Amino acid sequence: MKIVVPCSKSDTIDHHFGHCHTFKVFEINEAKEITNIVEVASPEGCGCKSNIAATLKEMGVELMLAGNMGNGAIQKLGNAGIKVIKGCEGDITECVKKHLAGTLSVIDITCDHHECNHH
């Protein structure tokens, strides 16, 4: 399984998917252990208008643990077969570990404003 997390410069979950510094893809084995982490450059521009969903799909990503994001991004990721859990925050590795342990708590918020002219 592969889980992706949009990251800020300090390796915390970025609060806005489309403006993140980078993406980190966590490879997970059958024992629910992190076996590898790959960094993926964040494309310029707004997330849902970029090709990031297709790139992540090609890498085999199945799940994104994210902060806030708009419905356009959620739909584009969903169309690529990537499930999204939003409302995550804090250290990216700890967030992935909590998800794997079933102890992740989230605040489900959808971004309703964009500087990228989605509407």
Image (tube, rainbow, N blue to C red):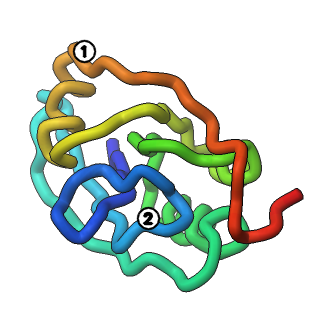
Is 103 placed left or right of 75 in the picture?
A: left
Q: Which residue shows up at 67% across the image and 53% down it?
A: 73
Quadrant where the C terminus sits is: bottom right
**In the rendered image, which residue does mark 2 sit on?**
59
**In the rendered image, which residue does mark 1 sit on?**
102
69 shown above or below 118: above
Between 23 and 81, the one lying in front of the other is 23
Query: Which quarter of the picture shows residue 49?
Result: bottom right
Circle 1: is it few (<14), some (14-19), or many (20+) Cα within 10 Å?
few
Is 1 placed left or right of 103 in the picture?
A: right
Between 6 and 61, the one lying in front of the other is 6
- What is the secondary structure assignment of the residue under circle 1? loop
Position in image of residue 96 (x %, y %):
22, 37
Query: Amino acid type of disc 2?
Result: Met
Sequence order check: which comes first, mark 1 or mark 2?
2
Q: Would you say residue 74 is visible in this rendering?
A: no
Is 42 placed left or right of 103 in the picture?
A: right
Query: Amino acid type of disc 1?
Result: Gly
- What is the secondary structure assignment of the residue under circle 2? loop
Query: Which quarter of the picture shows residue 94?
Result: top left
